[in-house]
Amino acid sequence: MRDREVQRALRHFGANVRRHRLRKRMTQGDLAEMVGVEPLFIRVLERAQRAPSFATLVRLLVALGVDASDLFTPAELQPNPRGRPRERRRSGAS
């Protein structure tokens, strides 16, 4: 596999990690804690600057509740919304 193809796969992977993390309303710190890595590592994964080990990949899949194919489908990194993800509203809470 050529370097360009590896970089493209890493970009898709990082964009999908971020998309699934935000869908679950998790911060990078939340995901890092669940996976057992530093928040900085999640940040560089999402920016396609590093690739995870196989063990970290498996822990990411479990933490995000997705299949491997969900993280490798073509996707592009979306602009970063500022601030922490919004908390989910609890139904019936007063």
Image: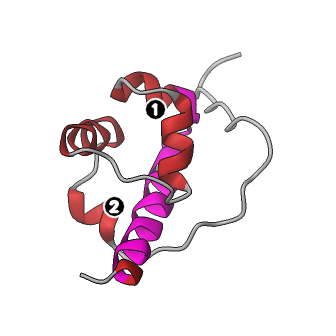
Residue 19 shown in magenta? yes
Q: Which of the two labelled residues, at mark 2 and mark 1, occupies the earlier sequence position?
A: 1
> How many other residues sit within 10 Å of disc 2, few (<14), some (14-19) or many (≥20)?
many
Instruction: Give the dominant element type of the magenta stretch: helix, strand or loop.
Output: helix
Residue 90: x, y in percent? 59, 26
Q: Extreme top residue here?
A: 94
The residue identified by callout 2 is 71
Q: Extreme right residue here?
A: 82
> How many other residues sit within 10 Å of disc 1, few (<14), some (14-19) or many (≥20)?
many
Can I make out residue 26 in this image? Answer: no
Q: Amino acid at mark 2?
A: Leu
Is 80 located above or below residue 77 in the figure? above
Judging from the image, what secondary structure is the residue with disc 1 in?
helix
Q: Observer-nearest residue: 26 or 10? A: 10
The residue identified by callout 1 is 31
Residue 93 found in image quarter: top right
Q: Amino acid at mark 1?
A: Leu
Residue 29: x, y in percent? 55, 27
Is 32 located above or below residue 21 in the figure? above
What segment is highlighted magenta in the picture? 5-29
Image point 49% across, 40% down: which residue? 42
Relative to 85, 39 lies left or right: left
